[in-house]
Amino acid sequence: MTARGEDPKVTALRESRCLHPHPDQVTDERFTSSDFFDPRDAVQVKYEMVRAVEEDGTAVAHAAAAFGYSRQAYYYAAAALAEGGLAALVPAKPGPKGGHKLTEQVCAFAEDQLAADPALRAKDLVGPIEDNFGVRVHPRSIERALARHREHSKSRP
């Protein structure tokens, strides 16, 4: 047990975003009659749910209910498994997946400013970007975005 008295496996599952939100709703016989199957492990539960439909011929609605998920969740899991394998069943990290302030338009503006005055640095662009686009960004974010923008521009024909 951890300092909070929690099972270390539950802690590990939570930290890896693989803790089933409703393990008590998993009623499939595999999970209720075996120690091997853990209803707290969302990846294992989703995999077995998809397998039950595809290999055992269980109806989607029945499988989803037996594994504690909705039919919609079944379809998402089946598509993720087909497209990306078992690793695709691990939920993605929440939050933005990339820079949402430094758009293509903002990067093009910054590149134009730098082309007009090569002595400018990223910190010198913070004010003009905020004035023109209404977004406040850190100089290091500008540097990283411009590096990505330049790399992306190189790869285009």
Image: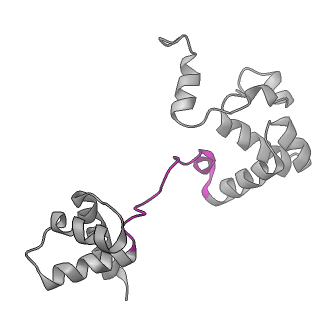
Q: Main secondary structure of the magenta part?
A: loop
| Coordinates of residue 44 in the picture (x, y in percent) | 68, 37
Q: Which residue is drawn at 52% across and 36% down?
A: 16
Please provide percent x and percent y for residue 12. Answer: 53, 27
- Give the magenta-colored segment's residue range: 84-103
Tell me the residue at 39%/64% (across/down): 101
Instruction: State the residue at coordinates (23%, 65%).
Output: 126
Q: Is residue 61 left or right of residue 42?
A: right
Q: How many labels does the image show?
A: 0
Q: Is residue 57 visible?
A: no
In the picture, the quarter occupied by the C terminus is bottom left
In the rendered view, does 154 fall on the left or right side of 36? Answer: left
Viewer-proximal residue among 72 and 108: 108
Q: Quadrant of residue 21?
A: top right
Q: Residue 87 magenta-drawn?
A: yes
Q: Against 49, is 151 above or below?
A: below
x and y percentages locating residue 41 in the rendered image: 66, 32
